[in-house]
Amino acid sequence: MAALCLGAPALAQTCRAPAPAVGRIVTGPVLHVIDGRTLCIAQGPTPDHWIPLRISPNAPVLPVDRERLMAATFSQSLTCRITGGQGPVKIASCTLAGRSLEALLTEPATITQAKSWR
């Protein structure tokens, strides 16, 4: 619960676009990573066009920290299917260049790169 509270101010300042309905697909670059599971997909140049998404909790491997999610996704174009969630942040299953985000998060290169974000 504390992680959600810590991310609340960052989310309030960014990622202000309304989340699409369950089943919809969102594609765009990641311009903000809030924590190890929450990011913003840009649909335009300003935060009021950035959609907040939480990586699916059903994923076998979740990012353990913000740095790893940053290393794998920042400025990359993701394709995300909205799978659930209530409120302003929807849950999504995402891919990058046809590969699952979960697979990318476990790659040694991503883990090494994440160390440089610290």
Image: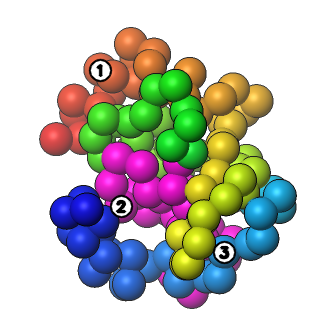
Q: How far apart, in angstroms, are the residues tagged by discs 3 and 2?
A: 16 Å
Task: Indicate yes or no whether the magenta region holds residue 10.
Answer: no
Q: How far apart, in angstroms, are the residues tagged by discs 3 and 1?
A: 32 Å
Mark 3 = which residue?
19
Viewed as shown, does residue 73 lie left or right of 21?
left
Q: Nearer the viewer, residue 59 or 65?
A: 59
Q: Give the residue drawn at x 66%, y 36%.
A: 96
Q: Quadrant of the N terminus?
A: bottom left
Q: Which mark is residue 112?
A: 1
Amino acid at dot 2: Ile
Q: How far apart, in angstroms, are the residues tagged by discs 1 and 2?
A: 20 Å
Q: Position of residue 20 (x, y in %)?
A: 74, 72
Q: Give the residue drawn at x 36%, y 61%.
A: 34
Element on which disc 2 rests: loop
Element on which disc 3 rests: loop
Q: Is residue 33 above or below residue 49?
A: above
Element on which disc 1 rests: helix
Mark 2 = which residue?
34
Which region of the structure is painted magenta? 30-55
Q: Residues within 10 Å of mark 3 (few under 14, many from 20)?
A: many
Amino acid at dot 1: Thr
Is residue 90 shown to the viewer in this render? yes
Task: Indicate yes or no whether the magenta region holds residue 40.
Answer: yes
Q: Nearer the viewer, residue 113 or 52?
A: 52
